[in-house]
Amino acid sequence: MLLKLRDITKHYRVGAEVIRALDGVDLDIAEGEYVAIMGASGSGKSTMMNILGCLDRPTAGSYELNGHRVDRMNAAQLAGVRNRQIGFVFQSFELLPRSTALKNVELPLIYSRDGWRDRRRRAREALEIVNLGDRMHHRPNQLSGGQRQRVAIARAMVNQPAILLADEPTGALDSRTTEDILRLFDELHDQGQTIIVVTHEADVAAHAARIIRMKDGRIIEDEVARPHVIRAHPPLAAVV
Amino acid sequence: MPLLLAPLRLLLVIYQSVALALSQIWANKVRSLLTTLGIVIGVASVTLVIAALTGLKDNVLGELEAFGTNKVYVLPDRQRDGPTAMLSWREINFKPDEFDDMLAHTPSLKAFTRMTSRTRPVRYADKLESMNVAGIDPDWHAVENRSVVMGRPFSLLDNEQGLPVCLIDEATRDKLGMDRDPTGEDLIIGGRRFRVVGLVEPEAQLNFGGGGPPQYSLYVPYRTLWNMDPDWRSFNWVIGAARSPDVAEEAASEIRFYLRTRRQLDAGFPDTFRVEIIEQFVQQFQTIAATVTLVAAAVVGISLVVGGVGIMNIMLVSVSERTREIGLRKAVGARPGVVLIQFLIEAVVLCLVGGLMGLLIGQGMTMAIRQIPGGSMEKAAIPIWAIVLSFGFSAVVGVIFGMFPAVKAARLDPIEALRHE
């Protein structure tokens, strides 16, 4: 298993009240899966995504990612895990406004232990995979919303992460560009990339092979829409 | 391999932080300029003060050098309290014969002259002027290194016989409206007739920048004045010339020993005279210069602290403005330490840019004060150590005042930061 969560609990203290954002979650995700995590707001799906993305530590429980026990790591170690294992895609893209597409995609490699040496080449290749080879030197404000999100996906993919973790990736896009982005996810998945999408939109989740529904900090439904087929290799392995 | 590459990666982070910092500064030109104003003013003023002081020092020391660092001054003097307080001025004042065999006991001393001086009315033809008249020994020419340009210098005979002769300089000659060659003319000094026997070279000026009138206008043999009128005896002193500036201090102590022996002062009894060398003036000046530098440094230190607070303020604004960016950087793998370094470097770069501007302004002002006509600032210049110090201080201010905002940035929670509006 690529991800192994056992009895993950996350409590927040708000004044005197303790909020159980996650209340004993068990979850296994295998390499190459395409998983959608759904739920209403307050269901715990955002907390889930923060824990899966190593942005936050669980209050209790164990989390094993690609063989690493990440639940007890410190901030610096978690930063390293995020850098190597996780590619984030955010709803509002989070591109650096004054940097070109190429510089934006290079960003994770700057903080990478072994990526900085040929970061220019790797960033270029990642942009070509998302079909932005001709927009490398454009700044975010010279790109459309769909193009911006593709830059963000290239940035997420540049470090060959174990999981691509997308948080409402189409929330800021119109329906046509939404289709574009979801098709890109499908392509990446076809090439063997493990993808986890956190969303509340059913048509976004419909692209995933497995849909996990959450409510009140628990998984209430784990539905395998399509059987999981292990595919060849992660997409960048051939070129990197 | 990764261990070996770690320092390289740090260099890369530093390089990129510097580039990022410069682009940030460029993007917020006005804000950055206002922010660094404290640093700019601090560095500009310290470099100007140091440059001015350096120029003044060169000038004054140069003049002291020209004046003669081998000079030794001997004056009657006493402490106002203790055993010497009982002594009358008459007792401690120099007598004419007190130095008669001094040269034999002071091997480091080349020559000396007894001196006395008074202001007297001087008349030539129908001109009447009040002038400083000095009584000198013939060795004065050797001590002051001033010969005559016309006529003859004083001789031993002039002194021993107390002849009514005098030397004047060009300024006095012109003031009295005498011919170009005044030798052989008679002057009335204090009601007595003196013959001008020579025209002496002009005085080497000891002016601390400002210049001033020559000390004396007329020179008369010491003995002549001593014999003439008791008034001349009331205060007199001795100027000696050591064989070289290096032995000036030895000469001073030889004179002191000679005089103490001559005056039969017991061990432990204070001197009834004072021996000074130019070196002491140099030291005094350097002490003053050091004090001024210290005060200037303190003032600049305060302005740098004020400037540093400005830097801290703007860095806090920058951290808060770029919270989402910090969140993103952390999400893609920036460790807290790297974020810390990035913001620290930004603060340091900001301060160094301010330091550079201050230095340029200081250099401009230095060039301006060099142009002041008749001033003593022609040699004003910013020494290398002041440049290094300015940049060093700027960087230190950046590190100290950038630390708090940088720590704040490094400690940001990536989730919170990405949610920040």
Image: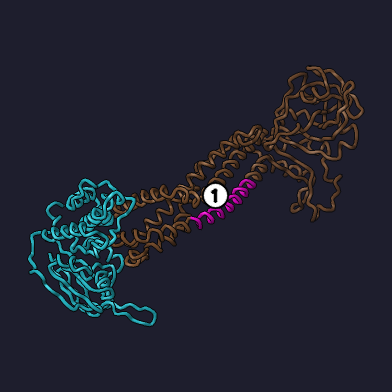
Chain colours: A cyan, B brown
Whether the magenta-drawn stretch holds residue B374 is answered as no
Q: Outermost residue toward the right?
A: B191
Type of the residue with mark 1: Gly
Is residue B134 rendered to the left or right of residue A115?
A: right
Residue name at image x 81 percent, y 38 percent: B236
Can the viewer see residue A80 in this picture? no
Check the image and report above or below for B341 versus A224: above
> Who's the residue at 68% across and 33% down the image?
B67
Observer-nearest of B9 and B70: B9
Residue at 57% x, 39% y is B365
Q: Which residue is mark 1?
A: B42
The N terminus of chain B is located in which quarter? bottom left
Image coords of residue B168 (percent x, y): 79, 25
As drawn, is A226 to the left or to the right of B150?
left
Q: Which residues are magenta?
A: B287-310
Chain identity of mark 1:
B
Query: Mark 1: which secondary structure?
Result: helix
